[in-house]
Amino acid sequence: MLERAIIDHASPTLARLKLGNLFNYSMQEGFPAEFARLRGELKDRGVTMTLLRVAQGKALIYIYRSPELEKALMCEGVRRLLRACGYSRFDVRSALETLKARLNALDAFPHEIGVFLGYPLEDVVGFIENGGRNCLSCGCWKVYSNECEALKAFERYEKCKAVYQRLFASGCPLTRLTVAARPA
């Protein structure tokens, strides 16, 4: 069930603790209708759900907060990294289109995706420069700087996930678990 997968993999985004989450989901009969329904429900709460790739019966689902992604894409350091990866436009829609194209064209996973998940830029760059080796810590992502803050974030995300899983199992609906967007 897609709702359960969202709780298991995207609770920190639903709770407005994190810019975005990404997960693979094995599509079953009725997936398009379920995806469309949940996408609408989440959008009403300020969360966007999109398909980045569909292949071999699996959907790569990205759940994010658009204002937070827009803010990240305005950072000059992020733009410099994305330019080096072939991005030419930095509005949310264009950046996601480039990411989708790279996901579908590359054999390897495009490591700049960490920017879209709200990972610290220093850690995304550190991962790329070190080929995923020599990290200080490993949790939700590989840490190359500010280890103390990253470990605190990992702990917050795990605690959030556990609370959301418990509440969802007790019957609390996904929409109630999704923190509304901040007023404009």
Image (cartoon, rainbow, N blue to C red):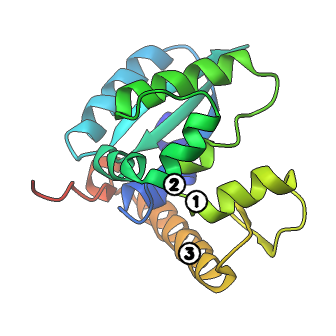
The residue wearing badge 2 is 77
| SS under mark 2 | helix
**Disc 2 + disc 1, Cβ < 8 Å:** yes
**Residue at image coords 85%, 56%:** 130
Q: How crowded is the residue under tag 3: few (<14 C-alpha within 10 Å), some, or many (20+)?
A: some
Q: Amino acid at mark 3?
A: Ala
The quadrant of the rendering that contains the C terminus is: bottom left
Look at the image and tell me whether residue 57 can be seen: no
The residue wearing badge 1 is 121
Q: Is residue 19 above or below residue 101?
A: below
Alpha carbons under labels 3 and 1: distance apart: 15 Å
Q: Nearer the viewer, residue 125 or 133?
A: 125
Q: How crowded is the residue under tag 1: few (<14 C-alpha within 10 Å), some, or many (20+)?
A: some
Q: Nearer the viewer, residue 119 or 157?
A: 119
The residue wearing badge 3 is 153
Q: Earlier in the sequence, mark 2 or mark 1?
A: 2
Q: Amino acid at mark 1?
A: Leu
Q: Nearer the viewer, mark 2 or mark 1?
A: 2
Residue 136: which disc? none
Q: Earlier in the sequence, mark 3 or mark 1?
A: 1
Q: Amino acid at mark 2?
A: Gly
**Residue at image coords 47%, 70%:** 163
